[in-house]
Amino acid sequence: MNDLGFGVRDRIDKAIYSKRKHVSFRFESSVNSKAPTVIQKANRALFKALDVVRDKNAVIVSMKIDLLMTGMYTMIDFAKYTGKLHEIRAGIEKAGHLPIEGFTYKYEKAAPEKKDEWIFDVYFFEADPTDPFARSISND
């Protein structure tokens, strides 16, 4: 990027990421909770959070979800949880017709006095639905 001139990377980041929106939410639930339970709680919290920051006249064209699970275990076997996490992603995506392009997850051991939690950080971009390019992306 140096050959493009001084500060180009900063200008590109500012132009793209200044329009990115973010919501964060959490709820108490065991890491061993069934996927439908987590999907129901996540959808309820996500749509409530989105109502606060979303532009009602725009469509979401790109979304990334970072999930942090906390619990009493020192570590968990993600081979056992991967199927459930994919089901959770699909459930969230289907409920809101959301274009989830990234879904990352990790686990941390919680402090002994803390309860198990699912913590979601959701980043998304919105676009004008009358823009033909944005409309073609949102209808895929």
Image (tube, rainbow, N blue to C red):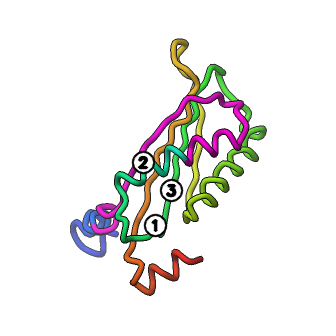
Region of the chain picked out in magenta, as a range: 15-43
> Pointer 2: residues within 10 angstroms few (<14), some, or many (20+)?
some
Q: Residue furthest bottom?
A: 132
SS assignment at label 2: helix
Q: Which mark is residue 83?
A: none
The residue carrying mark 2 is 49
Task: Say what amino acid the circle numbered 1 marks.
Answer: Ile
For label 3, the crowd category at 10 Å Cα-Cα, with few meaning under 14, some 14 to 19 and many 20 or more, is some
Q: Quadrant of the C terminus?
A: bottom right
Callouts 2 and 3 close, C-beta under 8 Å: no
Q: Amino acid at mark 2?
A: Ala
Q: Does the segment drawn in magenta span residue 53? A: no
Q: Quadrant of residue 7?
A: bottom left
Q: Is residue 18 left or right of residue 103?
A: left
Distance Cα–Cα, label 3 vs label 1: 11 Å
Q: Is residue 126 left or right of residue 66?
A: left
Give the spatial CA distance, label 2 vs label 1.
Answer: 14 Å
- Residue 34: percent from the left, percent from the top? 73, 37
- The quadrant holding residue 9 is bottom left
Residue 109 in percent (x, y) is at 58, 23
- Residue 37 rendering spot, x and y as whole percentages: 67, 39
**Residue 60 marker:** 1
Q: Are marks 2 and 1 in contact (CB under 8 Å)?
A: no
Residue at the (47%, 69%) spot, across then down:
61
